[in-house]
Image (cartoon, rainbow, N blue to C red):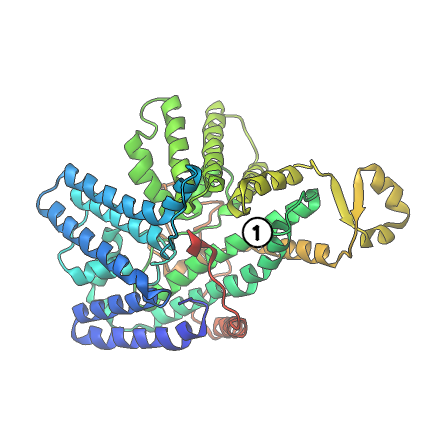
Amino acid sequence: MLFNSQPFLLLFLPVVLAGFFLLGRRSPVAAAWWLAAASLFFYGYWNPRFLPLLLTSVVLNYRLGALLRSRPSRRWLAVGVAANLLALGWFKYAGFLAASAHLPVPDIVLPVGISFFTFTQIAFLVDTCEGKASEGRFAHYLLFVTYFPHLVAGPVLHHKEMMPQFANRAIYRPRALDFAVGVTIFVAGLAKKVLIADNLAPYANAVFNHGGNPSLLLAWGGVLAYAFQLYFDFSGYSDMAIGLSRLFGVRLPLNFASPYKAATISEFWRCWHMTLSRFLRDYLYMPLGGNRHGKARRYVNLMVTMLLGGLWHGAGWNFVIWGGLHGIYLAIHHAWSALRLPLGRRAAMTITFVAVCYAWVFFRAADLHGALAYVAGMSGANGIALPDAFASRLGGLLPRVERWGITFYGGGGSQFIDTWSAVAAAAAIVFLCPNTQQIMARFAPALDSGASGASGASGASGAHRPSRLAWAPTRAWGVVIGVIALLDLLSLNRPSDFLYFQF
């Protein structure tokens, strides 16, 4: 079931909300069971055959958590982590490993959200073994893992963040402010998805799916369209998850905070998929030694962490290269920082964004050969070309333009103009407008809305600070959100998956 679908908005959500608050008046435990059951239905709506896998994973991890709570043991923790990773590895990486070894590729369907509920439960086991988490009620643990706003595309949750909220009896009584804040954030996220991301997709697909050797402007138009499509798609999902959860009086951790305004690649990762960055830092980078054993070891740890982070996103060499590029970027950033050479924020933002866009090519391209050809086009190896329709418009400037190395190719210029117009509009929203958390900051919509990014440093260009364009529960804002909601509903005729569902 999709957040951006009529069955979810008109049937599932109203019924779940009504049942949650009606049961919550009498028994918070019954309300927790109701919400957990609704979350299982939400998950099973995709493909019921994966429900046994999810439930088996939940039961086994709950039992192991109970064992670790009573008798902390690194050996049993290692068994639990290995079992979770083996399940994830079979469903997500068996085909990739078999193909790489030139063996018969098994026919395996990837369960939706397996990466998210696996990492969530690994974090729970580690925290339980270290005495940071404790859960005695199976209903609460089931809800913690399956809670539908986060289940299929994050954020990656910590038990200590979520379950104290469900233990608070106040959330089981509906509050007008929670509904106003939640609906506003959800409508904003839905608009990012259906009004912006889905309309950028055709421009990115037209270039990436065409193949061949794109020229400079064509290649950059396609990768920028994809960069902004992915931005608004993931930002939209993150907003919708936060808004939906706020309807239940529960705050999710912030997962997205204007990453393209980052001036360094470290800052980018503090603002893009923040809970995954936190997980990789706390449960991989730091156990490997972090920066505690010298510069060389630090760079190795960064590279290992980002390579595995790339593999987490997908089973393929393109994702390995994407993660490796970000590992190299991080190493370069730390080496540059050690030199203490000044670099203006705008220049640093531009360099960071260009580097991220180059890496996105490997994230989006169908195969390695296509990605390398695309990167060559972005770098000018295939020259600069414009549609033939532009030649007649240039008039007397045509000879000078051709001396600059610009050529012309067949076809009109409407697609070219439309692509770059869409890219320019998206860029204006990304770089010039406040993000949702800034607009809603006065009402603390997420757990760390007014705090720092995932690694404890300030967010990209004040990405968490309140904006002058601050939301308030007023009639004027109600009209604005109502108009956006109407536009959202009119765009639900062809609901599309979120890009992060495939990871």
Residue 130 in view? no
Q: Which image quarter: residue 162?
A: bottom left
| Residue 13 image point, x, y percent | 36, 73
Residue 374 in view? yes
Please name the residue that numbered disc 1 is placed on: 226
The N terminus sits in image quarter: bottom left
**Circle 1 residues within 10 Å: few <14, some 14–19, many ≥20:** many
Residue at 33% from the left image edge and 55% from the top image edge: 447
Residue furthest toward the right? 396
- Foreground residue, 353 or 116? 116
As displayed, is residue 34 above or below residue 102? below
- Foreground residue, 40 or 316? 316
Q: Which image quarter: residue 139?
A: bottom left
Residue 15 as seen in the image, left or right of residue 164 = right
Residue 336 as seen in the image, left or right of residue 107 = right
As displayed, is residue 378 above or below residue 388? above
| Residue 286 image point, x, y percent | 30, 34
Residue at 45% from the left image edge and 74% from the top image edge: 6
- Foreground residue, 39 or 435? 39
- Foreground residue, 372 or 163? 372
Residue furthest toward the left? 70
